Image (cartoon, rainbow, N blue to C red):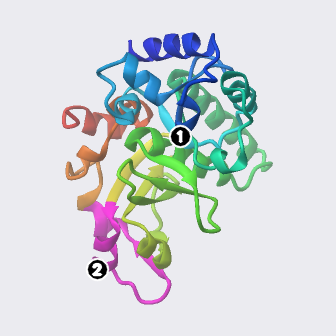
Amino acid sequence: MLKDKVFELAQRFSGSTHGSSDYDKDTIFVRGHHDNEYVPFSFLQKEMTELDHISKLKSEGFVFSSYDFLELNEFDQWYLGQFNKRLSSKVMKNIGILHFPDQKSIFDTVEVVHQTFQILKDHKVLMNGKNLPIQLGEWYSKIIFGLNQIKSSSQRGFDFKTDSGRIVEVKVHWHDSTSPKGVKIKKSLAELSDYCIIIYIAKNFTIRDILFLDSEFILRKFDTKGHTIFLKDQDVASYFFSRSDKHFDKVVNKMALLKFASPALAIKLEDRLK
């Protein structure tokens, strides 16, 4: 498997120092099996001729995040040990990490979380759980569409971008059905992005549907009076992944989409998602 080869090379690279090389200038590093094992992407490319782009790793389940977004304290020490120099803040802000999440463990955990949430809601302990669904939906977007989550130049924290640099606005809707008013999107965010992805998450935390729309299309087709745009189900129904194949080419990791889709969505996608 490609993952095993990457892990093997990360272990080998981390087993010796590389102070005389130029690998410290890499901006993309791949995490190995452990937090103290990494390998520059350019080194992987030299060792693996089939690895022409990071999208190949993404299609196998790797996820890209800005180093600033991740909590990888061991990377600083690894970098120092490998290159005999400290990781400066200037270099740090440009570094991205590709890491391989255990999708089975995450799927199993999602089921446990759903059960836990339901118990807490039944006993009126938990009334609002938006933070977890939002972060989970954003993670779904990253692994399914191969998005890069990087430090934003604005005050937004982190942006989602495609490998080609297109800005993506990710909106997460958590409920078994959509309000008659629709899903609310800020007009300013649509104007600042190239694409808008709406991930519809059911209460059991599986994906019940997805919208992948050009931001320009949203601004042109839907009412943009005021500062808010409402995407009502009846107006966007024909663009849902459950009905339309138009943006299937944007899916980088098809297996992840099928794994985390609700049973109803998975059945609709399985034969069409070639």
Which of the 4 image quarters holds residue 101? top right
**Label 1 residue SS:** loop
Q: Nearer the viewer, residue 236 or 256?
A: 256
For residue 27, the mark is: 1
Tell me if residue 217 is in the magenta stretch. yes
Identify the residue shown where x is 45% and y is 38%: 143
Q: Give the side of residue 157 with respect to residue 81, left or right.
A: left
Decide whether residue 79 is among the magenta residues.
no
Residue 75, placed above or below residue 163? above
User: Which residue occupies the foreground of this view, 14 or 175?
Assistant: 14
Inter-mark Cα distance, 2 to 1 = 37 Å
Pick the residue in front: 185 or 203: 185
What residue sits 28% from the left and 72% below the top?
Answer: 217
Vertical relation: 67 (above or below) 102: below
- Kindly identify which residue carries mark 2: 220
Q: Give the residue at x 76% y 50%.
A: 126
Viewer-side residue, 154 vs 25:
25
- Which stretch is magenta? 213-237
